[in-house]
Every structure is written in C-alpha cells, then in structure tokens.
Image: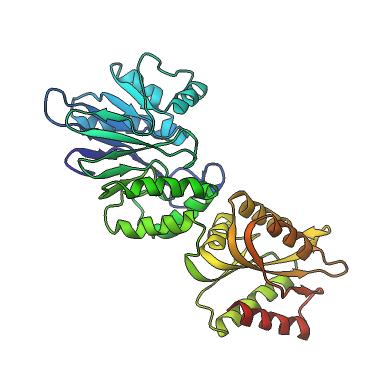
Amino acid sequence: MNISDSITYVGVNDHDIDLFEGQYIVPNGMAYNSYVVRGGTGADAKVAVMDSVDERFGSEWLGNIAGALDGKEPDYLVVQHMEPDHSANITRFMEAYPSAQVVASAKAFDMMERFYGENYEDRRVIVKEGSELDLGGRILRFIAAPMVHWPEVIMTHDATDKVLFTADAFGKFGALDVDEDWACEARRYYFGIVGKFGKQVQGVLKKAEALDIATICPLHGPVLSEDLGYYLGLYKTWAAYGVETEGVCIAYCSIYGHTKEAAELLARELEAAGCPKVAITDLARDDMAEAVEDAFRYGTLVCASPTYNADMFPFMKTFLDHLADHAYQNRRVALIENGTWAPAALRSMKAKFEGMKGIELVDLEVSIKSSLDAETRAQIKQLAELLA
C-alpha cells in the first residue's frame, strides 16, 4: 500500500492474538504498522523505516521491507515507541542491515538495552523535540510525545508529503483487513491505553496544530487521510475528558436478577423521558473495556450494585478502579444499591467517586431492599426524569 509516491506501508495483520496487552479483547485482531520513507532519487537520498512490529511477524515484516525497497537497503530504523509490539524486531533489522542506524529518543535507547541487551552506541542517532533527520531532500522532524503513552515516545512529521507519524496516538483495535467503525474501536483503544494521560495528549495536539498535516500514520489501525478534522476533534474531546455523546450509561451487577431488573427499568424510563441515548452494560458478562469506553463517552453514568461482603459487588469495584486508574472526571453520576439486611454498596461506590475529579453525585439515591417495590419503582422513575 502506497501512502504517497515516497511512503509505503510495510506493516502486518495479526489474527492470532486474543488479548491485546494481556487484557483487551480484540475479536478482529490487530495491525502493527510500519512504513518505508524514501528521501528521493539523488545520490544523497536515504531511506528510513518507521518502527518495527510484533516479534511473531519479524520474517513477514522484513520481507515486506525488502519487497518495498526492491534491492535497496534502508539507512535508518526510526523507533518512535518501545512497546514490544513495535520494537521486538529491532535486533533482527539491525542484523539484516549492518550499515543501518537506529534513530530514537534517549529514553528509548535505555529501554532498548533493558529489553534486548543492546543500545547500539556505535550505530545510533539520538533525537529529541525539534531534531531533524535529512533523507536527502526530505526532512523528518521529531516531536517529543512523552506519556502518549510511554515516556520515550516521539512522533515524526514529514513536511514534504504533509504526513504525521503518530506512534500509538490515533490508533485503534482491529486488523486492517477487517471493515469496522473507526470511532468505536479507536475510543475503546484510547480510553484503555492512553486515557489517563489526557493532559499530555492535549499538549501534543497543540504541537500538531502548528503543522501542515494531510495524512496521519499511526502504529495501529488505518492510515487517516480524509476528514482529519473529525479525528482531531474526537481526540480533543477525549483528551479534555469532554462529553462526546449526550446520553446515559448504566453499568450494573446483579446476583439474582433484582438489580438487573432495576437497571433495565431505569433504561426504559429514561427512553420514555426522552433521553437521547441509553447504553446499558452487565459488568459481569460484557467487555469491561467497552463499559469503560461508554462511561467516558456519555455525560451521565449510573452505577447499580448489590451489596456483597459489606461492600459493592466485585465487578463494580473492578469497574470503578478502572475509571479511577484512567482519570475519570467531569461527569454526573447516580447510584443505585441493593441489599437485604445491611445495604453498603452505595456508601462504597460513593467513596470511590469522591476521590475523582469533577464528579457531580446526584442527590437522589435509590436503595433497594432485596427486590423492587412500589416505592423504589417510583424513585427510579423520578431518577430517570431527573437524568433525562
């Protein structure tokens, strides 16, 4: 796949993976992106390869590079990010091309030695914010992007073709040979992988605003070349912890079905009251990463949990820990608890949210005693009218 006359895609698709980073379900696999950038046709023209791929695909990747270069050898391997799904074949590349140099940040070389036992002291080019790499008529300029989402990350701008290589930013779950909605899997990817570091993402987006960009080349997911304002706009919203979609996310756990009944009743009452969108998730059965994604997507979150061991239900605790770990903030939250003899879930959930920034806890709290009755049904209807 040609990105331009001078940039060729040489990445790979992975349909063998079941969990990305050991935790995220990826039914449509993953793409590990890599690019060949040619400097020109003159005697001083050089070639850079942008990033490696997962260890299991080293042979395929090196074959893709050889095919793209048709006998020419690359001069540089640019390592924007040291996570092993992008760096695991550095050693194989440097052995295959003994005259090549590796280009990365100082922190990346420290990690390189710890991961692979080699920092290429005699074959390395250390770059930082504002550094340039001359490929012979084509200049690559580097942008420091610490904590998006590791501290060593750099991005790369090619002003000639107006391409920004963004490391993990603007990435998504899913292999490139699968047709699926970008926003859904990019959102789940962002809030799971990068979401905690919104401030750092905002800083990099400000740098990007000063650049002439026609194409975004991430390390996961498709190359983006149309309607860039849409993708940049979503990233600005996500990075600022803003509300993307007006609506309510209901996250619940249920032991014997009574708390589920309350959550589903609330969903129906919200829809009847004109709520534009209601998303409901069973935290014990549904994908936890999608539940986290929906919590960040919508402006209102309702948590409904039975009491369990004088606390909230374990899956609710896990969910709220995920939210806290990813800097959940600036949302309206309502709470529903269930308990037969000593309800405690509400107190525990409230304590979790009180430790988060910008959370507005709704005053109307619903406490169910074992199962719904006329009073708690009326409270849920009232809550729906308040939230809608």
Compared across the picture, whether 374 is left or right of 50 comes to right
Residue 180 in view (yes/no): no
Say which quadrant the N terminus sits in.
Answer: top left
Q: Looking at the image, what colour scheme do you see?
A: rainbow
Whether residue 78 appears in this view of the structure is yes
Q: Where on the picture, by quarter, is residue 275? A: bottom right
- Snapshot quadrant of residue 204: top left
Q: From the viewer's perspective, tell me whether residue 148 is left or right of residue 330.
A: left
User: Picture coordinates of residue 18 (x, y %)?
Assistant: 51, 46
Taking the view exactly as shown, the residue that stands out farthest to the right is: 341
Relative height, residue 17 to residue 127 (above, below): below
Query: Which residue is found at the position 48% from the left and 43% from the top?
Result: 17
Q: Position of residue 168 (x, y in %)?
A: 42, 43
Residue extending furthest toward the left: 42
Residue 267, x across and y down, in percent: 60, 76
Identify whether 230 is placed above or below 338. Answer: above
Rendered residue at 39%/40% (across/down): 167
Q: Is 317 left, or right, of 216 in this rendering?
A: right
**Residue 331 in picture, x, y percent from top left:** 59, 64
Q: Give me the residue at 64% from left, 75% from top.
A: 264
Does residue 233 appear to the left or right of 276 in the view shown?
left
Between 59 and 322, the one lying in front of the other is: 322
Image quarter of residue 9: top left
Front residue of this view, candidates 266 and 170 = 170
Image height of 66 relative to 163, above or below:
above
Instruction: Tell how many labels.
Output: 0
Image quarter hosting the C terminus = bottom right
